[in-house]
Image: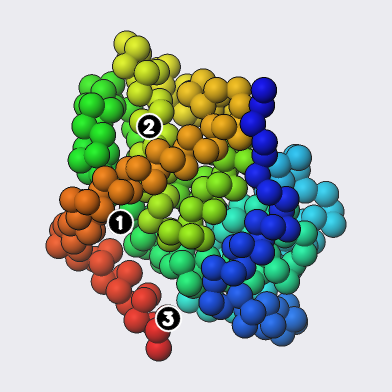
């Protein structure tokens, strides 16, 4: 029998909201930010991305595009340093669909960006994205050496897929019930859980990788996500979601025991001074 699904959206949103410290303040500011108008350049970028954005059920209708435009323009007005960057539209649409109203979706988007530090994924130079890509391959080597060895042997470009995963917080690459559980992890344990979810995906794909003669088959599976997830998660998407969460938590615990992630981030800081400065400057400005 199929396993039960997650709690209703309202219960999940209440849980996410309870884990943030800044939601109420951001929500309260939404009407004022909405009244502000972004620059012509930001407005053009947002409008250009609206038809490319979709909910789980398909493309946005005119009303959905207007709500998404409102949310993105309000966020751009609230955050001059970031404004709008492609990819934020998918985070916003994911939250809009789950929350059902603009104010709450805006508050949670702002919390993810500020409180959970996702701004670094989209800031000029994308310093946090660069950190995550640097750390991710080395993390695989440390916690999943056999899987890492197969990826290297097959020349699978894991960073290419991981970048899409991280920028969308997996909202584009995993079935929605699985992606929602990933967001649960982010709200409860922090944005760095994205690294361990990515590692969990490759761990669960290990049988496919090990059976492949070249990169063609695993790359085809990765390109087919989220549909292709059934090949390594099975037909029960809710059971698959719990498997991903359990594997990600286990890998995070394994890394924590050996201080692996801290060491890899320090290695990045030592070897990537330009990106380190961009991220440090962004954090300093946010704290001012």
Q: Position of residue 100 (x, y in %)?
A: 77, 59
Q: Hey, which quadrant is residue 287 in on the image?
A: bottom left
Query: In this image, 50 relative to 214: left or right?
Result: right
Q: Earlier in the sequence, mark 3 or mark 1?
A: 1
Classify mark 2: helix, strand or loop: helix
Question: Label 3, label 1: how many angstroms apart (C-alpha)?
Answer: 19 Å
Position of the N terminus by quadrant: top right
Question: Label 3, label 2: how many angstroms apart (C-alpha)?
Answer: 34 Å
Position of the C terminus by quadrant: bottom left
Read off the residue under disc 2: 202
Question: Label 2, label 1: how many angstroms apart (C-alpha)?
Answer: 19 Å
Crowd tier of the residue under label 3, counting other residues whose Cα lies within 10 Å: few below 14, some 14–19, many 20 or above: few
Are the residues tagged 3 and 2 within 8 Å (C-beta)? no
Crowd tier of the residue under label 1, counting other residues whose Cα lies within 10 Å: few below 14, some 14–19, many 20 or above: many
Question: 84 and 103: which one is in front?
Answer: 103
Read off the residue under disc 3: 286
Residue 185, numbered circle: none
Q: Earlier in the sequence, mark 3 or mark 2?
A: 2
Name the residue at 57% across, 58% down: 88
Name the residue at 35% across, 35% down: 158
Q: How is the image coloured?
A: rainbow
Q: Hey, which quadrant is residue 282 in on the image?
A: bottom left
Kindly give the residue lying farthest to the bottom in the view shown: 288
Question: 166 and 188: which one is in front?
Answer: 188
Q: Position of residue 7 (x, y in %)?
A: 68, 49
Crowd tier of the residue under label 2, counting other residues whose Cα lies within 10 Å: few below 14, some 14–19, many 20 or above: many
Q: Where is residue 174 in the image (x, y as percent from the top left)?
A: 55, 38
Query: Can residue 168 be seen by looking at this rendering?
Result: no
């Amino acid at each position: 029998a199929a396993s039960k699904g997650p709690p209703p959206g309202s219960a999940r949103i209440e849980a996410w909201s309870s884990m943030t410290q800044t939601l109420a303040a951001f929500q309260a500011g939404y009407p004022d930010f909405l009244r502000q108008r972004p620059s012509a350049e930001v407005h053009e970028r947002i409008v250009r991305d609206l038809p490319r954005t979709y909910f789980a059920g398909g493309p946005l209708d005119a009303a959905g595009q207007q709500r998404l435009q409102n949310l993105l323009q309000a966020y751009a007005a609230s955050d001059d340093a970031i404004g709008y960057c492609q990819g934020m539209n998918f985070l916003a649409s994911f939250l809009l669909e789950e929350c059902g109203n603009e104010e709450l979706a805006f508050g949670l988007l702002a919390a993810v960006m500020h409180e959970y530090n996702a701004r670094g994924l989209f800031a000029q130079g994308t310093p946090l994205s660069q950190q995550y890509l640097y750390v991710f391959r080395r993390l695989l080597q440390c916690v999943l050496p056999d899987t890492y060895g197969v990826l290297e042997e097959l020349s699978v470009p894991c960073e290419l897929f991981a970048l899409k995963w991280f920028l969308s917080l997996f909202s584009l690459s995993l079935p929605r019930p699985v992606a929602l559980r990933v967001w649960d992890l982010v709200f409860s344990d922090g944005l760095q859980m994205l690294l361990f979810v990515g590692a969990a995906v490759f761990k669960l794909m290990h049988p496919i990788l090990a059976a492949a003669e070249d990169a063609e088959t695993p790359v085809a599976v990765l390109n087919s996500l989220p549909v292709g997830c059934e090949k390594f998660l099975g037909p029960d998407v809710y059971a698959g979601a719990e498997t991903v969460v359990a594997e990600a938590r286990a890998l995070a615990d394994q890394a924590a025991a050996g201080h692996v992630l801290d060491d890899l981030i320090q290695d990045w800081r030592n070897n990537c001074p330009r990106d380190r400065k961009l991220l440090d400057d962004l954090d300093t400005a946010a704290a001012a």
